[in-house]
Amino acid sequence: MANINEKWCLESDQIQFFHDNGYLLIRSLYNYEEVFQMRGQFHQLITQTDGRPKNMSYSFMDPKENYEIDPFNPKNVQGMMDHVLASDFWFDHFTDPRVVSIMVDLLGPNIDFHNGKVRNKPPGFYSDQSWHQDWPYERHTKPELAAAITYLDDTGFESGATEVLPESHLKGEWDTSDGYRIPDDQVPLEEHCVLSANAGDVAIVHVLAVHRAGHNFTNTARHAIINEYKTSETIDQWNNRCAFAGLPLARNSELLMPRVSKSF
């Protein structure tokens, strides 16, 4: 069980890499036992979909021709919003002192929660979101937000790995074709990076980093949990009504939230 004092201190070169490139892949933040437990809790989340809080929402993907449904995700759950309401386990996950201390290192001493969601890639998943920045979806007075993507499965290029364009966050807001999507011809593909991740890895992605979700060409579903964080100084401009939005997690680099269960 992690406690309020168990932080994850980044190395100075990791912090600099994030500021230079707009993303950071942290290897093995969660160990084998933690991933095993998390996958068990996650399996309940995506199979026991009835009787959940009303403001939790699920999205399902129709089975794709020539692809089998993964028995781990038999309902082909593709996404979920506000999974943090499901149980104390998932509350403890987004308030994990390791992740919050990482956000303190990368964003600043005063950290609030922003929102939580699930992004799955069932067999045959095809992403139509294209290249984008998270910024148009969640505007604030300052771009001081970042997402933490927790991978529950090994995820490579053929199975839907996240792709990121290094240094793209330094150019501010990019032009889009529809307010959200960045045309492919604006993105120099030879410069992009595929975040091939292992189960237990966590990727941190800046709100201005240009990125996209990959496609899953395998018969094994890939699952990831995305929790987003912000500084307390940046003010919401998009009417965020997600669960626990604005919950204070750190002030003056001190973590505020005790664990409520023996989750990790």
Image (cartoon, rainbow, N blue to C red):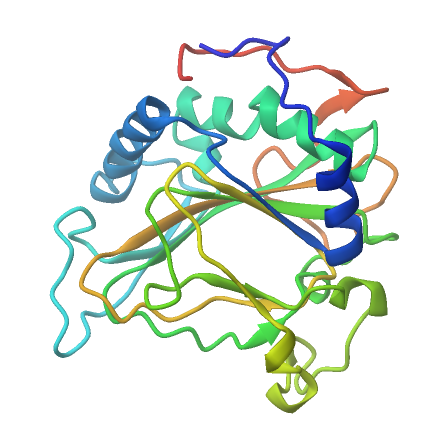
Rendering coords of residue 43 (x, y %): 24, 38
Q: Is residue 38 visible?
A: yes
At 50% from the left and 38% from the top, the residue drawn is 27
Q: Residue at x 14, y 79 (%)?
A: 65
- In the image, taking residue 110 as reference, residue 4 lies left or right, namely left
Give the x, y percent position of residue 132: 63, 71
Q: Residue at x 59, y 75 (%)?
A: 131
For the N terminus, the image quarter is top left
Snapshot quadrant of residue 264 = top left
User: Of residues 237 and 225, which is closer to you in this image?
Assistant: 225
Q: Nearer the viewer, residue 223 or 232?
A: 223
Image quarter of residue 212: bottom right
Q: Is residue 232 left or right of residue 94?
A: right
Which residue is at the far bottom? 185
**Residue at point 14% right, 71% down?**
67
Instruction: Answer with left or right where residue 26 lies relative to residue 104.
Output: left
Q: Between residue 179 and residue 216, name the one nearer to us.
A: 216
Is residue 61 positioned above or below 79 on the image? below
Q: Can I make out residue 172 in this image?
A: no
In this rendering, the answer to whether 183 lies above or below 247 is below
Front residue (pair 188, 242): 188
